[in-house]
Image: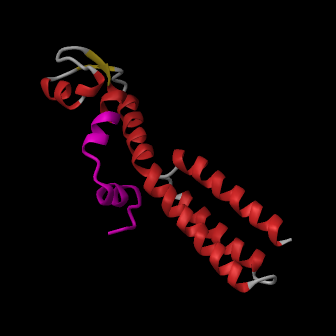
Amino acid sequence: MKIAGIVLVVIIWILMFFVGYFFASSIYLPIVSIILSIGTFYFFRKSSRKLAIVLSILTLFVFFGVIVTGFEEDYCWGKGEEAERTGLKMVIATKEDAEDLKGFEVKEGAQIGAGFRSHMLCHNTFNFPEALRENYSFIK
C-alpha cells in the first residue's frame, strides 16, 4: 500500500511539472496543488503520519518548483497571445526591437510577428513580483 501510494504521488508530481509548465500562471495551479497536498496527507495519514506530512510538504515544494521553472514562460506566452488578439499580426521592427531581439537576428525595418515581439520582449523585461501581482490580483 505504501509503495504503491508513493509511486502514485511521484507520478502526480511528474504530471504537475509537465502540466504546470504550460499553466504555471493560472490561478487554478495553486488551488489544485493545495488540494493535492491535503489529499496526499489524508491518503497516507492512517498508515504513517510522518510519511503523510513529508509527502504533503514535498507536494507543495513541487508546486513551488513548477512556479519557478514555468511561470515566466507561461506568463510571456500569454503576453504574446494578447498582442495577437489585437488583430495586428505583423509589425515593423524598430531600432530598439533590433537591439533587444539581437539573438533572433531581427533587423531594423524587418517585419516580425506581433506575438513573437511581445513574447520575447516580455522575457527581456520580466519582473517576477510584478508579474505575480498582475496575475494574482488579490496579492497586494
Residue at image x 20%, y 27%? 97
Q: Is residue 126 above or below residue 56?
A: above
47 vs 16, nearest the viewer: 47
Q: Is residue 60 left or right of residue 104?
A: right
Residue at image x 56%, y 62%? 62
In which quadrant of the rendered image does the C terminus lie?
bottom left
Q: Which residue occupies the extreme right position in the image?
A: 1
Q: Is residue 43 left or right of residue 116?
A: right
Q: Quadrant of residue 134 in the image?
A: bottom left
64 vs 35, nearest the viewer: 64
Residue at image x 72%, y 85%? 49
Q: Does 124 lie within the magenta span?
A: yes
x, y (%) of residue 76?
38, 42
Q: Main secondary structure of the magenta part?
A: helix
112 vs 136, nearest the viewer: 112
x, y (%) of residue 135?
40, 55
Residue at image x 41%, y 60%? 136
Q: Quadrant of residue 112 in the image?
A: top left
Q: Which residues are magenta?
A: 119-140
